[in-house]
Image (tube, rainbow, N blue to C red):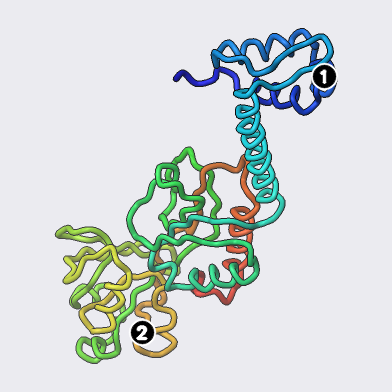
Amino acid sequence: MAPINDLNNLVFFAKVVDAGSYSAAAEALDMQTSKLSRRISTLEAELGVRLLNRTTRKLSLTEIGRTFYRHCAALIAEAQSAKDAVNQTLSSPQGLLRVSCPVGLLHGGLADIFSRFLAAEPQVRIALDATNRRVDVVDEGLDIAIRVRVPPLEDSDLAMRVFGPSKMILVASPTLMLRHGMPARLADVARMPVIAMGYAGDKVTWRFQDKDGNTEELVHTPRLHTDDLLTLRAAALQSIGVAYMPALAVTEDMEAGTLIRLLPQLSARAGMIHALFPSRRGMIPSVRALLDFMAAELADSSFPLFES
């Protein structure tokens, strides 16, 4: 059966039944009585049945009209419930947020931020995809995707909010340093085993600047090459090699003395922590609230993401 061409006619029909006459319904709908009558006639023609018995004195429902009216009334009630649900969602942070975030960022402090946000916003739920893979925000139905990229950040049709830098540092275990000696300059690291982030390849280049702005490079073949921060951190702790890692991923290890920062006089280009989301237009309060909460938390100078 072909679909009804104009669902508004169902509303008009229900309004006529509720009002008891075309004239009263037309007045409530602010439309001409003749136009309203034509819309009901069009609906009956589409359905191939008579819905209303018309006399000069009153209207009455046919048997099929009575059944049809019950469905129309239920449809209108559902539509109103849907609108009320949207209005409620738009009034305050609530409902489900679908968020994607790299594993390293979660272990570096974002997991705690998300937990504090949920404690502050009891009506919000988060479905968190902890992944290092590249995600498609729109196709996967995500509300927010957290990423770390070295500037310049890529062009995108998505909206973006930048939070700040994630510093990259060289670290190694005390055992590895006892074995090879503490490096005084980058050339000393070239004589040590190294482990690196990224995808498989023969050579990797690390670039740094000294305090005078001079560029130094280390080209090497890693013993371990991985895109997983947890694997890289575990290998560093097991003295497999010198690691080039985000400070956020090893802050607790450095505080515990299980990893040591090497060559602090050298600095590397920092990746920018940022959020991608479909659009700023029509942003629901829960998305805005989480972005604002993250911005405030990440701006805290004690947060390890921005440790120098």
92 and 172: which is toward the camera: 92
Q: Could you say whether the residue bearing mark 1 is in a helix, strand or loop?
A: loop
Q: What residue is pinned by disc 2?
A: 260
Occupied quadrant, residue 47: top right
Q: Residue furthest front?
A: 63
Q: Position of residue 96 (x, y in %)?
A: 54, 56
Horizontal arrangement in the rendering, residue 215 relative to residue 145 (left or right): left
**Dot 1, how many residues are within 10 Å of its Cα: few (below 14), some (14-19), or many (20+)?**
few
Q: Residues within 10 Å of mark 2 (few under 14, many from 20)?
A: many
Observer able to see residue 151:
yes
Q: Earlier in the sequence, mark 1 or mark 2?
A: 1
Residue 186 placement: quadrant: bottom left
Determine if residue 269 is in view.
no
* Marks 1/2: CA–CA distance: 77 Å
The part of the image, by quadrant, that contains residue 255 is: bottom left
- Which residue is found at the position 59% from the left and 59% from the top? 290
Q: How many numbered badges does the structure rendering display? A: 2
Identified at 59% across, 68% down, the residue is 118
Q: Looking at the picture, how far across and down is residue 298, in whole percent?
A: 57, 67
Q: Nearer the viewer, residue 193 or 133?
A: 133
Q: In this rendering, is residue 277 above or below 49?
A: below
According to the picture, the residue beneath numbered tag 1 turns out to be 30
| Residue 154 drawn at (x, y percent) | 42, 44
Q: Name the residue type under label 1.
A: Asp
Q: Nearer the viewer, residue 187 or 199?
A: 199
